[in-house]
Amino acid sequence: MSVVPTTLAVSVARRPSALGRLLRRPSAATAVGVVGAFVVIALAAPWLAPFDPVATDFGAVRKAPSMLHRLGTDEVGRDVLARLIWGARASLLAGLIPVTMAVLVSIPLGLVSGYAGGWIDDLIMRITDAMLAIPFLIVAIALAAFLGPSLTNAMIAIGIAALPVFLRLARNTVLAVKAEEYVEAARALGGSPLRIGARAILPNMLPPLVIQSSLTVAAAIIAESSLSFLGLGQQPPAPSWGTMLNAAQRYLSQAPWMALYPGLAIFAIVLALSVLGDGLRDVLDPKHR
Amino acid sequence: MTLPRYVARRLGVLVPTLFFVSLLIFSLQQLLPGDAAVALAGEEHDPVAVAAIRQKYHLDRPVPIQYAIWMGRVLRGDFGESMRNKIPVSQLLAAKLPVTVELAVCSMAIALLIGIPAGIIAAVKQGRPVAVAANVLALSGLSVPHFWLGIMLILLFAVHLGWLPASGYVSPWEDLRRNLATIALPSFVLGTGVGGIMMRHTRGAMVETLGADYVRTARAKSVRERMVVLKHALRNALIPVVTLGAIEFGRLLSGAVLTEQIFAIPGFGKMLVDGVFNRDYAVVQGVVLVSAGLYVLLNLAGDVLAFLVNPRLRGSA
């Protein structure tokens, strides 16, 4: 006896979304958790920080970690934990803003360069090559030096330094996608270049840019801490992990805790972002699947 | 394609690249807030000095002419003069180059010693704990902020154990033992980072070659596994690693800015930072220009090496 089903059971399992596939990997899921935790810490800094991050206390200079100051105090008696929590803001901002800048500039330029070709493409690519010929951090340092030291200028410098990688990636993706049949079809149907760019090409540019973003945010965070360490980024007394390490270097033998925690924080977030980048590549890039 | 033709073709791309590099570095000067002559004069606010600089660097002329004059000097090896100590920048560069080269060579040696064996292990023992450990190590080497690692190593080896000096540099001609002692920690710091990159590329290439037909054939002929891995697979896997090694070496040569700063090693990186802080812009431009040039040339060297060891490139390129 057969029962006619009232609803047709869909036998084709829906392919889980990219996010779902990413979170199924233990390493990537952990990485998402770590990055998420840093974001929460940065957002909730005013509520989480046990002390004012810039309040000095000359009665508690370079005190070792204790119940009151969990991670100790620095050379002018500021609470290291409070500065670490507030410092997450500078680091995450310096990771996100320059990369967002670079992505937003590279999409239109990459589209123009890849789609138009010709002398525009040549010009943009030669400038990109020239920028890639100078190592990332050197570009950032040189720009920050000439722009003047501040967190904003450091972010601009990092954004410009990060631009060529994204630009080349965007342009190469456009070139690859341009040759696909569905783009040919869209063109044959009389779509305007703008429409083809936005509807047929843009969606395909995003996965490689997302993967690269995750890795570049990590590089940008290291760059910000490096610039701040050198005195070219966040200016004291505002907290940043890089400036904390700069101060710590002078009191290495007396107050090693000043150097330990900011570095661990940078290490943790950069490691998490690298693992996340690897996971994203495995999930989004068909060649790596 | 023959080697000379390949090199000629690559040089054809290189010249415009270097032209744009020089243009970028020159235009940094235009970013200086306010009057460039005043900024270039640094601490000197004497109007006579400012006027002298304006005249010397032709800052009163149109920008394209300024660039042409500047480039003409650079091509003759004249990078200007350091504002700080009135020494030609070219002379300073020549003095710092051997230090940076030594640091780069030592770092590269450490990177290869760590990266290639770890990459082989990770590929051969895929999924086993030792491979996972190698992967974690490589990823850590890539993610650790080097200047912080440097600080931590100083804390351990100089402050606590007292085995190595915390900073400073002694020339090898002066005292080789002390030279090696001063260069050990910075080389290790830089070597771990590059080692992580080398490891990941060695692993990737090894996984690919280990799955290749000729490796299966070798195994079928019951060649000993050690021979299969080291001779058949590794030899081919090293091709991309060689190219990458040349590029990474170029990056090391361009100055390990923060590492040199922390260990007070007087190489290109420290010269750049000192230039930045003394507002000694000719020094900054000189270092960036020379390091970019070296980087581009080593990139070319890497490609030529790849071309030489990989016969397949000769047909297609």
Image: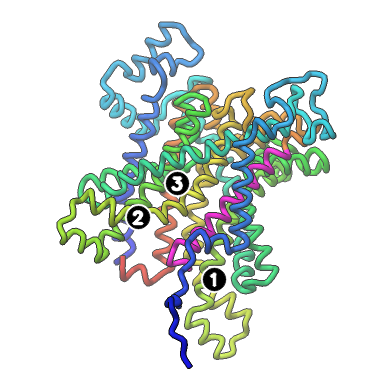
**Callout 3 and callout 2 share a chain:** no
Does the image show residue A256?
Answer: no
Residue occupying the point 76% across, 29% down: A251
Query: On the image, numbered disc 3 is attached to which residue?
Result: B295
N-term-proximal mark, 3 vs 1: 1
Describe the element under mark 1 as helix, strand or loop. helix
Type of the residue with mark 2: Pro
The colour scheme of the drawn protein is rainbow
Does the image show residue A228?
Answer: yes
Q: CA distance from mark 2 to mark 1?
A: 34 Å
Residue occupying the point 58% across, 31% down: A228
Q: Nearer the viewer, residue A57 or B240?
A: A57
Describe the element under mark 3 as helix, strand or loop. helix
Disc on res. A203: 2
Magenta stretch in the rendered image: A260-289
Query: On the image, numbered disc 1 is attached to which residue?
Result: B206
Query: Taken as a whole, is the magenta stretch helix, strand or loop?
Result: helix
Residue A16 colored magenta?
no
Q: Which of the 4 image quarters holds residue B198?
A: bottom right
Chain bearing mark 1: B
Type of the residue with mark 1: Met
Describe the element under mark 2 as helix, strand or loop. helix
Residue A124 screen position, x and y as percent: 29, 44
Residue B275 screen position, x and y as percent: 52, 27
